Amino acid sequence: MSEKWKQKILLIFPFAVLAAGMIFTATFFLHTYRQIAFEHTSALCETILANSPEAEPQLLAALKDYHSLTEQELRGNDYLEKYGYRVDDFCYDFPLDTVLFPILFFLVTACAFAAGIFLSRRKNRKRIADLTEYLEQVNIGAGGTLIQTKEDEYSHLQDEIYKTVTMLYQTRETAVAAKKNFAENLANIAHQLKTPITAAFLSLQLMEKEIPRAYAEQVKQQLKRLNRLEESLLMLSKIDAGTLPLKQEKVDLYTVLNLAADNLNDLLRKNHISVDIPENGCIEFWGDLEWTMEALINLIKNCMEHSKPSGVVHCDYSGNPLYAEIRIWDDGAGFDTEDLPHLFDRFYRGRCAIGDGIGIGLALARSIFELQNGTITACNLQNSGACFEIRIYSH
């Protein structure tokens, strides 16, 4: 017998037992009622004939007439009430075993029904728990298999789960391979750019005395931009390949914000922009100080470029048991509504972009924080101004 049939029997058995118990109890009570009615009628006839033996023919005729009465004619007959008899005066010595046995049988039947339901539900819960545990192991990357040799109602679900997980593994491996290949190609492009950029810088230095200074400066600026692009591409390739070296150490938010602002001192002074960083106490998270500072530099620089003349870039930080939070905002016009969904896309430059950036700074910042179990979002403040919110989670 297959496990599927066993499951069906286990499910049907409690209901069958309960139905059998109810039928048996009803049949038993009907038989008991008829037995008692027969015994009392016999006792009554015996008493009549003991007192009046000559009334036997009339008594037998009366019994025949009684048997010919229909249920409707018997129902509601209260003929004896005019002689002072009541219903309680009859069958007053009802035998206890007549009631006790059906009650016990009904209780046993109910217990069997409850036990069958309990066993069936426990088996179902165990199967669901096994499948859930298997999916949890898959989600954390532990893998493993769930062996079920006997077929039941969850076997089809289990097969579909295995098929889906196998397909997801294959898709993941394909995606990882494609990502690794893309990162390698990006790194190769970055390295290939390095050589002509360096050669162009050297050639420009040799030619500076022969060409006008204004032209030389334009070429130098474009070469510097290409050099920044090469460095950014190399960094992106390391992030995509998962080879960016990140330390795990305690990083103080106040310290890393000040270090980021100090690295922009010359640029801030040139644009007459100040940075406000309040001291809110020691709040730390586990991460990499250097790369976190690099990401914050990109965010502060973005706010500086979009601040009002002689404006202020505001920084704030806080912490709770779940995450450490950093907020950086400016007093400018804020982000364009159409730019908000694409701010952190690589090589995206907004409608109000300033300077000769290549649209990688915000994408790098997001990647760095995500590698440290963090998130970054951008929004517009109610009183105007653009705001970045970073949350770095403890777990």
Image (cartoon, grey):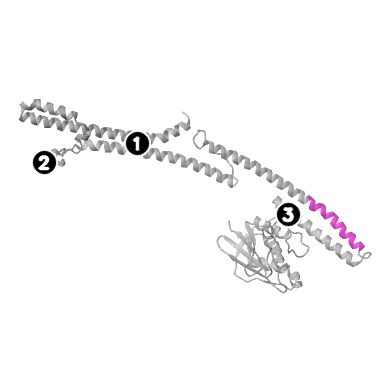
Is 287 in the magenta?
no
Q: Which residue is mark 1?
A: 18
**Which class describes the residues within 10 Å of circle 2: few (<14), some (14-19), or many (20+)?**
few
Q: Are marks 1 and 3 in contact (CB under 8 Å)?
A: no
Q: Image quarter for residue 116?
A: top left
| Of callouts 1 and 2, the N-terminal one | 1
Q: Which residue is mark 2?
A: 82
Where residue 157 appears, as percent x and y from the top left, is 53, 38
Q: Which residue is mark 3?
A: 236
Q: Which secondary structure lies at badge 1?
A: helix
Mark 3: amino acid = Leu
The tally of labels here is 3
How much space separates mark 1 and mark 2, taking CA atoms?
45 Å
| Of callouts 1 and 3, the N-terminal one | 1
Out of 210 and 156, give the one closest to the viewer: 156
- Quarter containing the C terminus: bottom right
Q: Which secondary structure lies at badge 3?
A: helix
| Of callouts 3 and 2, the N-terminal one | 2
Examine the residues drawn in magenta and state their main secondary structure: helix
Query: Which tag is nearer the camera, tag 1 or tag 2?
Result: 2
**Bounds of the magenta segment:** 188-207
Write the residue at 63% across / 65% down.
327
